[in-house]
Amino acid sequence: MDANFANLKAIKTSEVRGEIPSLLVDGEAVVAAFQTVRDQVIFTNKRVFVVNVQGITGKKTSYFSYPYSKVQFFGIETAGVLDIDSELMLAFSNGARLQFDFRSNVDIRKISALISGYVL
């Protein structure tokens, strides 16, 4: 699955969806979280969770788990003068690619350092 999530804003880790803690394994913790209007991207110390809320009512929800151990490479693009968002791209060993576009106030370098600590 290839996915692109745009206009992500930072949220407190305490603001992740209520069901996320029950999906974590022993020793796993949420380290950063972001959301669009309804979707969330959650970085833990072991993986990236993508929560995709679907439908008009928002009752149908998909959860995708992307472990750092399967990341082949990743890259960032910082915000510029006219291009005010920053981007993170992750490529996985199964060929899947994720692209996240963050609002300009998100520190993309901090996210890159976080991922580097788990991937390398």
Image (cartoon, rainbow, N blue to C red):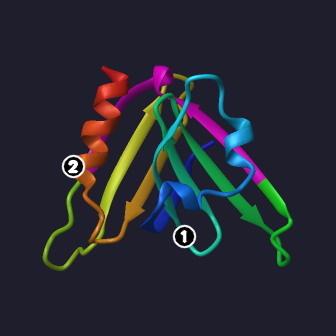
Q: Is residue 67 magenta?
A: yes
The answer to whether 54 appears left or right of 85 in the picture is right
Q: Which residue is mark 2?
A: 109
The answer to whether 107 appears left or right of 70 in the picture is left
Name the residue rendered at 26%, 54% in the picture.
Answer: 108
Tell me where residue 70 appears, x and y as whole percent.
50, 22
Q: Distance of mark 1 from mark 2, alpha carbons?
A: 20 Å
State the image quarter where residue 56 is shown.
bottom right
Mark number, residue 49: none
Magenta region, main secondary structure: strand
Q: Residues within 10 Å of mark 2 (few under 14, many from 20)?
A: some
Tell me where residue 48 appears, x and y as whole percent.
53, 40
Q: Earlier in the sequence, mark 1 or mark 2?
A: 1
Q: Residues within 10 Å of mark 1 (few under 14, many from 20)?
A: some
Type of the residue with mark 1: Thr
Q: Is residue 4 magenta?
A: no
Split into 4 quadrants, where in the image is the C terminus? top left
Name the residue rendered at 79%, 57% in the picture.
Answer: 61
Q: Nearer the viewer, residue 6 or 38?
A: 38
Split into 4 quadrants, where in the image is the N terminus? top right
- Range drawn in magenta: 62-76
Name the residue rendered at 35%, 50% in the picture.
Answer: 88
Tell me where residue 98 appears, x and y as whole percent.
49, 46
Tell me where residue 32 appears, x and y as whole percent.
43, 49
Circle count: 2
Name the residue rendered at 45%, 66% in the picture.
Answer: 8
Mark number, residue 36: 1
The furthest residue to the left: 81
- Name the element at disc 1: loop
Type of the residue with mark 2: Arg
